[in-house]
Image (spheres, rainbow, N blue to C red):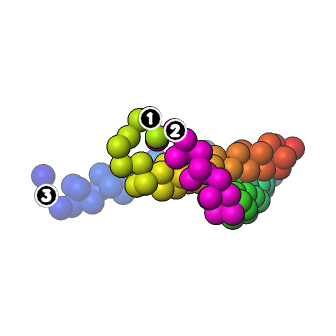
Amino acid sequence: MNTDDKHDNLAELFRNFDPELHSDHSFMHDVQQRIEGVDMVRKECAKTRHATRYAVVAGIIAGFIAGVIATLTYPHLTAIATGISDTAVQSYETWTNTAAQILSVAFSIGSALGGYNLALKLFPTKG
């Protein structure tokens, strides 16, 4: 097959090509629907981002407050851990400090997670 035959075949294909064109009104209607869909998704993402920011801030504040409370009550936590460790462990001084610190950290983490979950419920993303 030579180049003239290929050229003729291509020319024939383009001569017979008659694509179906939609009206301008139909095209604009489809574009408008797609733009509205994208805008709706963007608004929902903004609501979710907004609520999540509040929840993160609430979790941070709750964790900080719980950490301060745990630090202030550290002597009491040490006394509680000492009462537990008298019967369980020989070297209870190290155990007492470790147990008190674990209780403080657990309290802070639990408070932070609770504050985060509470804030997510108070600032719902739907609506």
Answer whether labels 1 and 2 touch (C-beta < 8 Å).
Answer: yes
Q: CA distance from mark 1 to mark 3?
A: 100 Å
Residue 35 is covered by the magenta coloring: no
Q: Nearer the viewer, mark 1 or mark 3?
A: 1
Answer whether labels 2 and 3 touch (C-beta < 8 Å).
Answer: no
In the picture, measured across the screen, residue 23 lies left or right of residue 95, that is right
Residue 80 is covered by the magenta coloring: yes
- Mostly what secondary structure, the magenta segment? helix
Position of residue 15 measured from the top left corner of the image (x, y, whole percent): 45, 53
Query: Which residue sits at x=84%, y=46%?
Result: 122
Query: Which residue sits at x=44%, y=35%?
Result: 87
Rate crowding at label 3 as few (under 14), some (14 to 19) or many (20 or more) other CA atoms within 10 Å.
few
Q: Could you tell me which quadrant the C terminus lies in?
A: top right
Give the residue at mark 2. Answer: 84
In the picture, measured across the screen, residue 6 lies left or right of residue 58, that is left
Mark 1 and mark 3 lie on one chain; the one further toward the N terminus is 3
Give the residue at mark 3. Answer: 2
Q: Looking at the rendered structure, which numbered label has been put on residue 87?
A: 1
Q: Quadrant of residue 14?
A: bottom left
Q: Which residues are magenta?
A: 71-85
Residues 113 and 121: in front is 113
Amino acid type of the residue that numbered disc 1 sits on in the rendered structure = Thr
How many numbered discs? Answer: 3
* Residue located farthest toward the right when viewing the structure as drawn: 127
